[in-house]
Amino acid sequence: MTVRTRFAPSPTGYLHIGGVRTALFNWLFAKGQGGQFILRIDDTDAQRNVEEALAPILHGLKWVGLDWDEGPEVGGPFGPYYQSQRLEKYHAAVRQLLEAGAAYRDYATTEELQAERDAAQQAGRPFVYSRRWRAETDADARRLEAEGRQGVVRLLIPREGQFVLNDLIRGEVRIDWASEQDHVIQRADGTCLYHLATVVDDHDMQISHVIRAEEHLSNTARQVFMFERLGYPLPQFAHLPYVAEPGSKTKLSKRKLDKYLKNRDFAQLMEHGQSIARRLGLAVSAETFNPVIVDFYEQVGYLPDALLNYLLLLGWSLDDKTEEFSRDEMLKHFSLERVNKAPASFDCEKLVAFQSRAMQKLPSKQRVAKVVPFLQRAKLVTDPPPCDTAPYVTQILDAARDRVKVAGDILDFDDFFVANEDLKFDEATLEKRLRKPAGARDLLVKYRESLAQTESFSAADLEKMTHAFVESNGIKIGDIVHAARVAITGKAVGFGLFDTLAILGRDRCLARIQRALEITA
RNA sequence: GGCCCCGUCGUCUAGCGGUCUAGGACACCGGCCUUUCACGCCGGUAACACGGGUUCGAGUCCCGUCGGGGUCACCA
């Protein structure tokens, strides 16, 4: 039997990080065994603009490289892949359930139902619908309709016995049927609800393994009930632990952003992303741009593989030491047996560590290719770039090393791309390194002369020259390095000064020092 | 509250009865390196929720307690 899994998001307008992990596990499980991964859109409830709300989800999945064998845009033999376009199939299933005596027409009003619920709560017993407005015959139905009531279709759930699920991750789970409700599967207006639609589609699309988050565990009994009464073979179920909030075991949710922002690491990740977005001139509201939403990582310049590698380890592990997985290795090693049961909280710092490591391992050319678009969007490099951009950026990246953790970090080195006269100086550093220390400016004047006269402008030779300069002036190296750095880059920090000088070249260094001296005069 | 799930360092985890004086990773704390900020290197702190069983032997099996979470819609 070929393995077929599915990811079934509803069009919400964004792709949640937890959703990506669910998609990833489905994708790995199917693809690792030569099976198919299906994308289905659960839009039974959608009154909104589906196209618009779906686009970011499709885009996000493509960005992380979780491609689907069947679904929107690619089609497939079991389409359509939008639940809103499959209503007839659901209606047929409802009819079948009705005929099999597994469902019934019900005419209770919302108020009547609520009254029963309240009564149950007052009496301190669990709510079980009395089935008082159930139409057992067509005549009943006509009579109730004549009263002006509207009918829905409910599942006729058994009131005794036990349901036993053999979950691939959680093992045996038992639930009393009596604790299940007679769930509505079709509304008065004829539209169908999620549980029914999922069952029909999972069967229709020949899904072999339903891999989804734990919050669906309690939905499984009613779905299995429908599978069985519809005469469908049962797929295997695997309920993943959910992804929890940073520093907590509560389910991660987009709605609680304010709370997460109080978490130091989360706030830091967010701030880092926002500072890059600002420099790109991106208008970003926290609502649509935050670390819970996948788009955030793309905008800031994360590597999809690093994100996925991190997510893979959130609830799964291979052994006691392997942490880095390429796409192929993930496919080769992933298994449901090694998925954990306990929820795993989202750790921003570990994600960043994975990203940083992946970025450093990237071949130089690819890193340049990742970074250049950010320079272009920040208007620091033209589009298309001049032909000397690649070698120039390569030099910067090599010198910056892991200071460029995400592609957007290249903007920290904007001083390499601005014209001399546009260079902005950090006032505090200017004060500390040039204005305040006695003789600092005079020293810089002399150093500038040495730079003007020195023969080779390579980093290694500049270092030798500088050491000689330090010695002949009887100063410490720190006395000149900091002053020179702020004069040339405008900043207090950066990578090695000699690399900086060499990359910028003699003309720019001399001009910038000159300007710094004038400003501080 | 009912039902269900879960419980090893701060976090992600390894552990499937003896090899556990509990291993790895991120974070944290020292030290070294150093022109700043990083990196790197060396070292360190830190966990089996608790209580009963079972067993020669329990982090590992069973029960209970406690704690955390999920879910209880004409949402998905």
Image: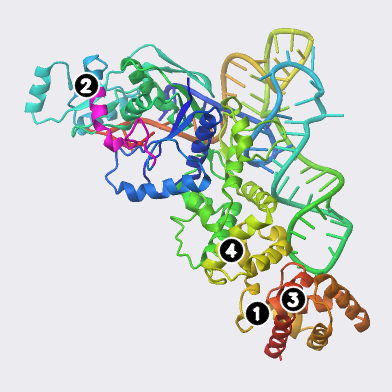
* Magenta stretch encompasses residue A86: yes
The answer to whether residue A255 is visible is: no
Return the chain for callout 1.
A
* Nearest to the observer: residue B69 or residue A67: A67
Q: Which residue does the image show at 41% across and 35% down from the upper left? A: A70
Which stretch appears magenta? A74-93
What is the distance, in whole Å, between disc 1 and disc 3 at their CAs? 11 Å
Q: Which residue does the image show at 61% across and 37% down from the upper left? A: A328
* Nearest to the observer: residue A383 or residue A300: A383
Of badges 4 and 2, the one in the foreground is 4
Q: Position of residue A49 (x, y in %)?
A: 29, 49
- Determine the secondary structure under disc 1: loop
Instruction: Please state if A394 lies on the left or on the right of A464 as rendered.
Output: left
Of badges 4 and 3, the one in the foreground is 4
Snapshot quadrant of residue A300 = bottom right
- Determine the secondary structure under disc 2: helix
- Determine the secondary structure under disc 4: helix
- Assess whether mark 2 and mark 1 are in contact (beta carbons under 8 angstroms): no
- Assess whether mark 4 and mark 1 are in contact (beta carbons under 8 angstroms): no
* Magenta stretch encompasses residue A367: no
Tell me the tag on residue A372.
4
Of badges 1 and 4, the one in the foreground is 4
